[in-house]
Image (cartoon, helix red, strand yellow):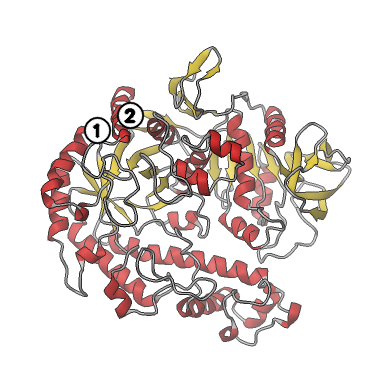
Amino acid sequence: MTTRALRPELGCCYYPEHWPRARWAEDARAMAAAGLSWVRIGEFAWARLEPRPGELHFDWLDEAIATLGAAGLRVVLGTPTATPPRWMIDRHPDMLALDAAGRPRRFGSRRHYCFSHEGYRAEAVRITRLLAERYGANPHVAAWQTDNEYGCHDTTLSYSPAASRAFRRWCEARYGTIDALNEAWGNVFWSMDYASFDEIELPNLTVTEPNPAHSLAFRRFSSDQVVRFNRAQVEAIREHSAAPILHNYMGRITDFDHFALGADLDIATWDSYPLGFLEDRVEADAAHRMRFARQGDPDFQAFHHDLYRAVGRGRMWVMEQQPGPVNWAPFNPAPLPGMVRLWTWEAIAHGAEVVSYFRWRQLPFAQEQMHAGLLRPDGAEAPGLAEAREVARELAETGAIETARAPVALIFDYDADWAWTIQPHGAGNSYFGLVFTVYRALRALGLSIDILPASARDFSAYRLIAAPGLMHVPDDLGHALARADALVLAGPRTGAKTAEGAIPLPLPPALPGLDVTVARVDSPRPSPGVALVGGGTMGRYIEELETGPEARVLERLANGAPALVAQGNWRYLAGWPDAAAARRLVRGICAEAGLETLELPDGLRCRLAGGRRFWFNYDASPVAFAGRTLPPAGVLIEDAS
């Protein structure tokens, strides 16, 4: 990522079809007056655009776009394919996805389709093309969004007949012959050999767990189906529009490869709900949840900003920013005053070009009626609007914000996440959880981080590269890491599997230039864990290492077993550290790499962006550091030189 100068903007999500037409112009003027520049519309409007098959009603959308544009707002137009209308089910009754238990994901909410259904895919392309033909040259339509939140509500994996047929074709294309598939999957075990591709079923409803190679292939197939579905819409839009195309991803949704999907798009956007995520997507104890209940986890949003900046090849937006209480988490508290401003500035510090609030006005009906907006249901201002206005004023005064490459890279691989999900080897173990442990330790030391895909091969700009839990390491990636000038933090489970999910021979990690063998693995309970000599513990996953004469043991478990081993530029971690151990061990590796670290108070985080350093206080109390004090939800921007 090269240095770029950004002039970040604000926006909101709006649903003109929910409100009387007489309200639209008033809303548009108020959005512009609040300092908003962008507005997303249309992503759930199929039934209003086409209430009956072939009966198209574009007049209201024409007027809505014209009204918003007249107020100086730029429109992101969504394709409405996340919510096919009821008549679509009558036309394609087999288009519904089936869950792993064989139950249909029925009409009555959203995302009720199977990515593998050819009939629905054709319908999605048809409505997308109609929209692109009509609005592709419209001066107010400045960007497009495909569908909405792929994978949300566990909708990537479908066990429908359409998915079964498509999976067989996918397997034949990948393996060529059934003998090659049997060999790759190890089907000699338990007499699982197939005589033809037509015999292959989906890996569900088996007596005990299905073959992990079968499950891994199904997850790769399912990801490819999402990419294929999205690509068809992108191609239809590009026939008629030169405006950038984006998709809004979610927090901790790893069921499909976002890097693969993002390769077809211009911008990666994501939907940031810090309080909702803390309640149902962040692994944390009760004390942590209570402490940050009204602020959100101090690292979760930052991780996704960095991830989606990578998915977008340097271009990232927040399409939906939480402005108040949400409706869908186990508990839905109101944000601490100032947090909407903090979340917005943190996204900008991590490279967001646009931060868009969800939504403009809270809806008084249907599933999201308890989800706050910038306005209340009666049209009065909600608390988040004042903070959005404040950010708009501050942006006007701040000017351009530079982005630059970070000194630390963290590799994130969706394929590794699937392999961990299939064989976690311990309750609660997850690839995301391990990677996030390392990310959190780096952030607590005041470091800025770039996230990279496993396809990266150029590491010349980095001084430290972290690749924890990278289950399969292709030979060329292993050699690229070994040749890097940076230190490389690997393990546990780095290189633990072949491409087809088997244990490799020679035994893992089998990394070039690292004379270490994982002789045995142990999956103890996370608490109390196994003590490290230097402090902290390892739990969840521990590897028993055999080390060669060139490998140096830098850290041991209390029982004397190697915990951190060094050879060349490799630093191999033999287990899953707790937060204290992760922070201490990472601090030592950073010192070796010549990286300056900070000792940040809990809740205080920072991000370097060009010549500025941004400080964020996630704590509900003031925090003092380096002779300064930040109030609760405080943001400080200073010259980093």
Q: Secondary structure at mark 2?
A: helix
Sort mark 2 into few (<14), some (14-19) or many (20+) by Cα contacts within 10 Å.
many
In-front residue for pair 284/118: 284
Q: Which residue is mark 2?
A: 391
**Image vertical order of residue 108 relative to residue 368, above or below:** below
Tell whether 485 sits left or right of 606. Answer: right
Q: Which residue is mark 1?
A: 35
- The amino acid type of the residue labelled 2 equals Val
Q: Secondary structure at mark 1?
A: loop
**Image vertical order of residue 117 relative to residue 361, above or below:** below
In-front residue for pair 291/308: 291
Tell whether 553 sits left or right of 175. Answer: right
Percent position (x, y) of residue 164?
51, 78
Say whether residue 307 is visible.
Answer: no
In-front residue for pair 196/119: 119
Taking the spot 44% from the left edge, 64% from the top edge, the residue there is 226
**Image vertical order of residue 499 relative to residue 277, above or below:** below
Q: Are marks 1 and 2 in contact (CB under 8 Å)?
A: yes
Most extreme residue toward the top, as rendered?
Answer: 627
Q: Quadrant of residue 446?
A: top right
Percent position (x, y) of residue 467?
65, 46
Percent position (x, y) of residue 420?
65, 57
Tell whether 139 sits left or right of 397. Answer: left
- The amino acid type of the residue labelled 1 equals Gly
Say whether residue 430 is visible.
Answer: yes
Taking the spot 51% from the left edge, 50% from the top edge, the residue there is 252
Percent position (x, y) of residue 355?
35, 39
Residue 26 — which label? none
Sort mark 1 into few (<14), some (14-19) or many (20+) by Cα contacts within 10 Å.
some
**Image vertical order of residue 197 relative to residue 443, above or below:** below
Taking the spot 30% from the left edge, 79% from the top edge, the residue there is 90
Q: Quadrant of residue 581?
A: top right
